[in-house]
Structure formats: structure tokens, C-alpha cells
Image (cartoon, rainbow, N blue to C red):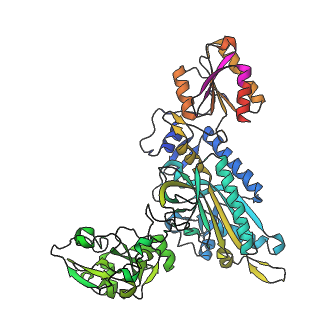
């Protein structure tokens, strides 16, 4: 490709609303342009990179036994209502009506559509297992589309779906997809971790992993063990038992719970600051003893969750434990209306609403819990005794330094990550709801067992740029770079330089090496800045040594430079890219 005719306009400065580095660099390097919030046009360089990621995804999906299809983006709303997700997905589902007032949705995902397709196409165990996939544009009405391609309202996604006769078959399909994802992200040169995760709005049975590209600007927090391979999203992460916080009853004095008044009235919010260290006597100030209680509305019903005061409630875990679709923090008025008593007169140990207790405080026998009465707290709380009807479970976010739940010898440390892939074991969730069955060998009708597997194809581009850049611009890995080699003659008016540049350009093309020739009449500084910005792996500079048929090779990733005869340069480039 000749740069003079390439649709490529670089920017010296990024737009003010571009916050993260990938967004800034992809705009400046002329890969994308914003049409509206969260909606982007891919310019030639960006489309070339996107196409290469798609090719890697297709090759590995085909290698894993997948068959490519293409499903409609416009989906009948009744499918979403039949699956039960129409209301669950919320305002992110873009809804519309046609001229006949029939309701449709722009697909954010395709579980309903693929289940309907397979229901009509496969009716015998003889056609199973099967894996179908597509690479297609998805739509989600994000509340705050931001960070360029990392969170858009329109994006490119690969979604695959497996169909098996039983769970053993699903386990095999899941592992094939898991392995394929590892190959895809490795070939894309991503620094990633596969982590245990929550299924979220997709739903499904036990078994789901997210693939996280590790980067400081990631929206997700990943907990990783320092000793073993355990890794989990913060929504899913668990903590091992700390022996130091589980004393035997012989080691402690178990006194009765009692309310104690504090001389200085507490003005803190009783809903969110229960157990404040500033208002508990110093001799009882160990953080494992201080408790706090949060009130929530779970599908409109009031519940209370008690955790240590230095821990945070994990609302995802609470929703999963209670089978709740909508969970929100309750305000004073809502709680008082449900309980029927002003909040300041409620005895937290005598609550009649459901109470959830985090397992980390089960063994606390001298806990301290703020009373919902100004200027007082309860001491000597023993949850097992004082809250006998409470539900015990894992209801908190892990914290750095917690014991690993797998090996119990390592500690959890945190990283930030960008989710680039997610694999789920759906089981019969959608097949039962939408009537997708098959006949087994005995002629009996059985529900199909499903898995689904998504990759954010366009998001991969942003994640790679986040991980591969310097102060001058992007550093593309060779596998997905828009071009392999950037040939840059210093002066297009120098006949010897241009003659050698043209020869090199054609020789590399004959070897099926993708080359961009900068044939613009620009100053050398402009050319070099643009070359660094767009990040092509190898730059060939043709300058004052052109008469001796010598060129300078510059490695974008390392800035390593070497002067070579053009024949040696061609061979060196070929060997590096082979």
C-alpha cells in the first residue's frame, strides 16, 4: 500500500474526551473515528487490524470444531420474553417497533436466536455434539459509553454455542473452547489470565470463566493467588479460612450481648457505618470484632446483610444466594415502611426480616454491632447464638492478603483487567425455556445441554494497545499489525532513494510481506513521528546510504537499529516474520 493514497490522517493531539491511552492512540493513529457516543467507524488501518484478529479467531474456532454461521442482529422481542430475559437485561437492551407495531430488539447476544435455530434443525442425538459460531456486530445501550472500543454501544463480537446430549459432553466442549481461547489470546500477544467469574445476565449453571487482559485501566478487579493458579473476578472471588480468626470456645469468654451507650452521640449514617472504629472503646478495637449491617431491597423485600466493618458486601453474591433479580440498597424511608418502626428504634438482634451473615464472622463471639439508636452499640455479639435464624454464606468482597481458598497457603493479590472473553456452561437454561429438545438412542425426548462462548473482537484491539505502547505511539505485535513493514524514504525527491524504495517494496510484496510505502512529500520528522505513532513492527529507512544499496532496519518494539545491504535486509525481514 502507498501511504500517499491511504486514508490515514494522524492527529498530533487526542480529543479532550479521550481518557484512556488506547482511545487516544487509536484516534491519533487514524484507526477509528467516532460517529456518536460509543459508535465508531473503522478506517483502513483499524479495519486491517480487526480483520487479522477475526482471522485468528476463525482459525482457532474452526480448529476446535466450530462451524461458522451468521444470525440476524434484529431479534423478535417475544424470544426474549420467552427466555425470561426481556426484563432482566434492562435498559441496555435496545428495543424498537416496526411499521406493524411488532416489537424487536437489537441483539446484544444470541442465546435465544441460536436455541430457536437449533430447535428447528436438530432433533436427533446423531447430529450431536455441535458447535456453531458467528462474528457479528452487537448492540447494547450503555449508560455511559466511554474508553473508546472498551465500552461501546455497537461492537464486534464472536459468540459460539455448543450443543451436547449430556453434561459430560458439555464439559468436553467447554474445555475445547477454553483451550481455543488460550490459543487465540496467545496468538494476539495478550498478557491475560483466565479467572473464575459470575454468569451475570447470561445465566447458566456452575462453570464460567472470564479471560482478562491485565492492565491498570481495566474496569474489573482480579484476585490472584501468590502460590497456586487460582484466579477469580472480584464478583466471584472467595477467601480461605484464616485460623487466627476461628478460636475455639475454650479460648474465649462468651458473655451475653448487651447494649452500651457512648457519651458522644454518633452522627454517622446507621445504614452504612455500623461498627465505626471511632466510636468503639480501644480495648475492643480489633477489626475482626467490629461488624456492620447493610439493608437492601431484594425484589422489593427488605433484607439485612452483616459483615465485618472493614469488608464490603458483595451484592452479586447476595443476589445469587437469595435468587434475586433486582437488588438495591434500601433508604431509611423504605426500611421504616417495611419494618413498621422508625429505624432508630429497631433492635438489630430482633429483626423479623431475613438476615444474611458473612461466614467470616460466624466464629466471632465478642463482636460489636452498632445499634440503630444514636449513641449506642451492642457488644459481645455471637452470631451463632444471637441470630440463630440468619443465613450464613459468602457475602463479601475479598481483600488483598486474604488466604487463597484453593491452596490456603498463598495470599490473594489484586490486578486490574479488561474482559476480552467469557465462557459459560448454560446447561438446559435456554433449551428448556424455548423447547429445544432431541431424541436420544431410546427415542426419548431430552433437553439439549448448552454452552456459550464470547470474545470481544473489537475490544481486543483496545486491550492490545493498552498493553503495547510507549510515549511515541502504538507497538503492534507482528501477528495483528496493519502492515508488517513500513518503508520510509527520507526524501521522495531523491531519485536513488525512491528507486531503492520501490525495489524493496516490490521484493517484499513478492514474499507476501505486507508493506506500507511512505511516498509522501513530507519532512523526515513528520514521517518518523507518524511511523512511531501507527506502530508497524519493522521500519526500513532509506536515506544517505541509498547509493550503496544500504538501508536502516528499526525495530519498533525495541528501537534496535541496524544498517544492512538491501539483500540482507530482505532476508532478515523474511526470517523475522516467517
Quarter of the image that includes the C terminus: top right
Residue 476 can be seen, yes or no: yes
Figure check: 558 above or below 294: above
Describe residue 150's horizontal placement relative to residue 291 as left or right.
right
Which quadrant holds the N terminus?
A: top right
* Residue sitting at x 63%, y 45%: 189
Q: Residue at x 33, y 74 (%)?
A: 289
Tell me where residue 18 appears, x and y as whole percent: 45, 44
**Which residue shows up at 50% across the image and 78% down it?**
321
The answer, for residue 98, to whether it is visible in the render is: no
Q: Residue furthest left?
A: 263
Q: In this rendered view, identify the residue nearer to me: 511 or 156.
A: 511
Q: Is residue 505 above or below residue 217?
A: above
Q: Which residues are magenta?
A: 549-569
Residue 505 higher or lower than 204, as above or below = above
Q: Quadrant of residue 301?
A: bottom left
Q: Nearer the viewer, residue 17 or 564?
A: 564
Near-viewer residue (446 or 225): 225
Residue lying farthest to the front in this orientation: 250
The answer to which image quadrant residue 245 occupies is bottom left
Front residue of 408/266: it is 408
Q: Is residue 554 magenta?
A: yes
179 left or right of 338 in image:
right
Residue 426 image point, x, y percent: 65, 71
- The mark total stands at 0
Question: Where residue 570 sits: x, y (%)?
Answer: 73, 25
Query: Left or right: where does residue 284 sit relative to residue 310?
Result: left
Q: Picture quarter containing residue 429?
A: bottom right
Residue 140: in magenta span:
no
Q: Position of residue 298 (x, y in %)?
A: 44, 78
Amino acid at each position: 500500500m502507498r501511504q500517499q493514497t491511504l486514508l490515514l490522517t494522524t492527529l498530533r493531539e487526542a480529543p479532550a474526551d479521550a481518557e484512556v491511552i488506547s482511545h487516544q492512540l487509536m484516534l491519533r493513529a487514524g484507526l477509528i473515528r467516532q460517529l456518536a457516543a460509543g459508535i465508531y467507524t473503522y478506517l483502513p488501518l483499524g479495519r486491517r487490524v480487526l480483520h487479522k484478529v477475526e482471522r485468528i479467531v476463525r482459525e482457532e474456532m474452526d480448529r476446535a470444531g466450530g462451524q461458522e454461521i451468521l444470525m440476524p442482529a434484529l431479534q423478535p422481542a417475544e424470544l426474549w420474553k420467552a427466555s425470561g430475559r426481556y426484563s432482566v437485561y434492562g435498559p441496555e437492551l435496545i428495543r424498537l417497533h416496526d411499521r406493524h407495531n411488532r416489537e424487536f430488539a437489537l441483539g446484544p447476544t444470541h442465546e435465544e436466536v441460536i436455541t430457536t435455530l437449533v430447535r428447528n434443525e436438530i432433533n436427533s442425538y446423531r447430529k450431536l455434539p455441535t458447535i456453531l459460531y458467528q462474528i457479528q456486530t452487537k448492540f447494547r445501550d450503555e449508560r455511559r459509553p466511554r474508553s473508546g472500543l472498551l465500552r461501546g454501544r455497537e461492537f464486534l463480537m464472536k459468540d459460539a454455542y455448543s450443543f451436547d446430549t449430556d453434561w459430560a459432553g458439555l464439559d468436553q466442549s467447554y474445555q475445547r473452547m477454553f483451550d481455543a481461547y488460550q490459543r487465540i489470546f496467545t496468538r494476539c500477544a495478550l498478557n491475560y489470565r483466565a479467572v473464575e467469574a459470575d454468569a451475570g445476565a447470561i445465566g447458566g449453571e456452575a462453570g464460567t470463566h472470564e479471560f482478562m487482559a491485565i492492565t491498570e485501566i481495566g474496569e474489573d478487579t482480579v484476585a490472584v493467588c501468590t502460590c497456586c493458579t487460582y484466579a477469580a473476578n472480584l464478583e466471584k472471588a472467595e477467601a480461605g479460612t484464616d485460623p487466627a480468626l476461628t478460636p475455639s470456645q475454650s479460648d474465649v469468654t462468651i458473655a451475653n450481648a448487651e447494649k452500651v451507650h457512648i457519651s458522644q452521640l454518633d452522627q454517622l449514617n446507621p445504614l452504612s457505618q455500623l461498627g465505626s472504629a471511632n466510636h468503639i472503646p480501644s480495648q475492643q478495637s480489633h477489626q475482626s470484632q467490629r461488624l456492620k449491617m447493610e439493608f437492601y431491597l431484594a425484589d422489593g423485600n427488605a433484607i439485612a446483610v452483616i459483615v465485618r466493618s472493614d469488608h464490603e458486601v458483595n451484592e452479586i453474591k447476595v443476589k445469587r444466594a437469595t435468587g434475586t433479580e433486582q437488588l438495591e440498597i434500601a433508604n431509611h424511608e423504605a426500611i421504616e415502611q417495611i419494618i413498621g418502626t422508625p429505624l432508630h428504634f429497631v433492635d438489630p438482634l430482633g429483626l423479623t426480616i431475613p438476615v444474611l451473615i458473612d461466614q467470616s464472622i460466624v466464629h466471632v463471639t465478642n463482636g460489636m454491632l452498632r445499634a440503630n439508636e444514636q449513641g449506642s452499640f451492642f457488644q459481645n455479639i455471637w452470631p451463632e447464638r444471637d441470630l440463630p435464624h440468619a443465613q450464613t454464606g459468602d457475602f463479601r468482597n475479598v481483600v488483598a492478603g486474604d488466604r487463597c481458598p484453593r491452596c490456603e497457603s498463598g495470599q490473594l493479590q489484586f490486578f486490574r483487567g479488561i474482559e476480552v472473553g467469557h465462557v459459560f456452561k448454560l446447561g438446559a437454561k435456554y433449551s428448556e425455556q424455548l423447547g429445544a429438545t432431541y431424541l436420544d438412542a431410546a427415542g426419548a425426548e431430552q433437553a439439549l445441554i448448552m454452552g456459550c462462548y464470547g470474545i470481544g473482537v473489537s475490544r481486543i484491539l483496545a486491550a492490545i494497545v493498552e498493553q503495547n505502547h510507549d510515549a511515541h505511539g502504538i507497538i503492534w505485535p507482528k501477528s495483528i499489525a496493519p502492515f508488517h513493514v513500513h518503508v520510509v524514504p527520507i526524501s521522495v525527491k531523491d531519485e536513488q532513494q525512491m528507486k531503492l524504495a520501490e525495489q524493496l517494496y516490490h521484493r517484499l510484496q513478492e514474499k507476501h510481506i505486507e508493506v506500507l510505502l511512505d511516498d509522501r512529500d513530507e519532512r523526515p520528522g513528520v514521517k518518523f513521528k507518524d511511523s512511531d505513532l501507527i506502530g508497524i513492527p519493522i521500519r526500513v529507512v532509506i536515506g544517505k546510504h541509498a547509493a550503496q544499496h544500504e538501508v536502516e532496519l528499526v525495530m519498533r518494539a525495541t528501537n534496535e537499529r541496524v544498517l544492512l545491504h538491501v539483500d540482507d535486509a530482505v532476508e532478515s525481514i523474511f526470517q523475522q516474520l516467517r
